[in-house]
Amino acid sequence: MAKFFGTNGIRGIFKEDFTLEFIHDMVLAIAAYFKEGPILVGYDGRDSSPIIAKTICSTLNYCGLDCSNTGLVPTPCLEYAVKKLGYKGGIMITASHNPSQYNGIKPAAKDGVEISREDELIIEENYLKKNWIKNSPKWGVTNTENRAIEVYVQGILSHINSAKIKSKKFKVVLDLGNGAQAVTAPIFCKNLECQVFLVNEKIDGSFPGRGSEPTPQNLHDLSKVVQEKNADFGIAFDGDGDRSIFCDDTGKILTGDKSALILAKHILKKFPNSTVITCLNSGSAIEKIVNDSNSKVIRTKVGSVEVSRKMIPTKALIGYEENGGFMYGPHNQVRDGCMTLGLMLDFLSSQDEPLSQKIKALPVSFTTKDKIHCTSEDAKKLIKFLAEEFPNSDTTDGIKITKTQKNWVMIRPSGTEPIIRIYGEAETKENLDSLMSEYLQKAKSIISR
């Protein structure tokens, strides 16, 4: 069966493989999955998003489903509003961190969490077999939803110690990445009486500042402003505002793994005997941290859908990915950049030492990742070759070759772009550099055969 959903929703290059005609037909399939409305529709700051929103709303209406358009909001804001305001589901128009020519659609279930892999298959089958709502006795209507941002911000504030945070008068640098958190994160910080400095604050679908994905390589402006303003920390969001990468008070950019460990340690201290869900490609230090609070880790395939949907039946407190996607169960089981910002403020308000000192106290581990452009056929060839060479490896998701618990490499094809990603962990920086160099060369050599 044709596969339309990738690691995170359906994405493509607008006007090429992601046309208005395709979107219309796919929404017919999504409407048949939802069966009833109202459905909440929102979008990120990409240039093509408003016209896609009109197409989605009119298609839902044609199928007899009412919907509400909440306009430009971060993905986690739409998801939380679906749950909190009682919608039957949601459709977010976003391609997250993909380049500006891409766009996509991401359905959320009525619980405010992206739909499961099983439900994705139902939608794909609806699309291929044209199992659409035909001859609906009535047309639906499209309304405007103005409550989403306020509900979202208040929801986050309800989970943190606002009074203590206000008393600290934090200085925070927000790198909004020309993306959707520009409509929520500054409002959130204003509520907490933080002194805020903005970087890349203008919403722009071409992402001129640093691109749509925050990486340690493109956050020098954030780092510079943190140092110049003597800020407590900085945070950078991706295009749709569900992921966040932190910068400590010295200007050092933290990996998603490092910030997740800091927050997990803080949260588990308050709520021991809990469950943490993370992916196979996250570092091994989390096992040490959960042991200290009598908690446990469950690992999943890569992808926020895998983590989010595992959190619900296990009643997990925390979920995270190494790419800066952090999920706080009591709020919503989805990646949420602004909730993560709130948790970091909550953590630092309870400390006397700066963030850079708290990072030094974490278990020592070094993680990194890289990528190679690669067709899906070459990716299959590469993984097959490595699986034969390393027969004891974990092939649940790509291939993870483990030498020791803290010394491993994982290779998997991206579910959103024509690339393979290579992740690694080692006990020293030198060993990590050597490991990554070895496997990058190995991968390129196998692909070119």
Image: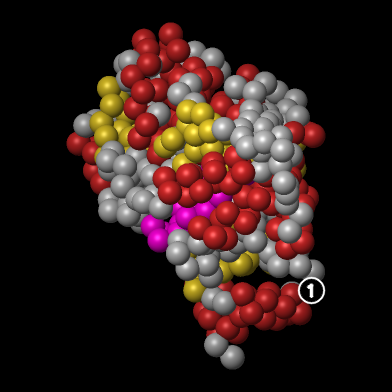
Region of the chain picked out in magenta, as a range:
92-107
Colouring: secondary structure
Q: Residue at x 73, y 49 (%)?
A: 134
State the image quarter where residue 353 is shown. top left
Q: Nearer the viewer, residue 71 or 210?
A: 71
Residue 121 at x, y percent in the picture = 75, 55
Identify the residue at horizontal 27%, vertical 41% (top origin): 202
Residue located beneath label 1 in the image: 391
Position of 245 relative to 357 (above/below): below
Q: Secondary structure at mark 1?
A: loop
In the displayed structure, 104 sits above or below 186; it is below
Q: Nearer the viewer, residue 347 or 188?
A: 188
The foreground one among 246 and 18 is 18
Q: Quadrant of the N terminus?
A: bottom right
Q: Amino acid at mark 1?
A: Pro
Task: Kindly tell me whether residue 152 is visible in this rendering.
Answer: yes
Is 30 on the left-hand or right-hand side of 15?
Answer: right
| Residue 150 or residue 242, whichever sits in front | 150
Q: Quadrant of the C terminus?
A: bottom right
- Quadrant of the image occupied by residue 10: bottom right
Residue appearing at x 66%, y 32% in the figure: 37
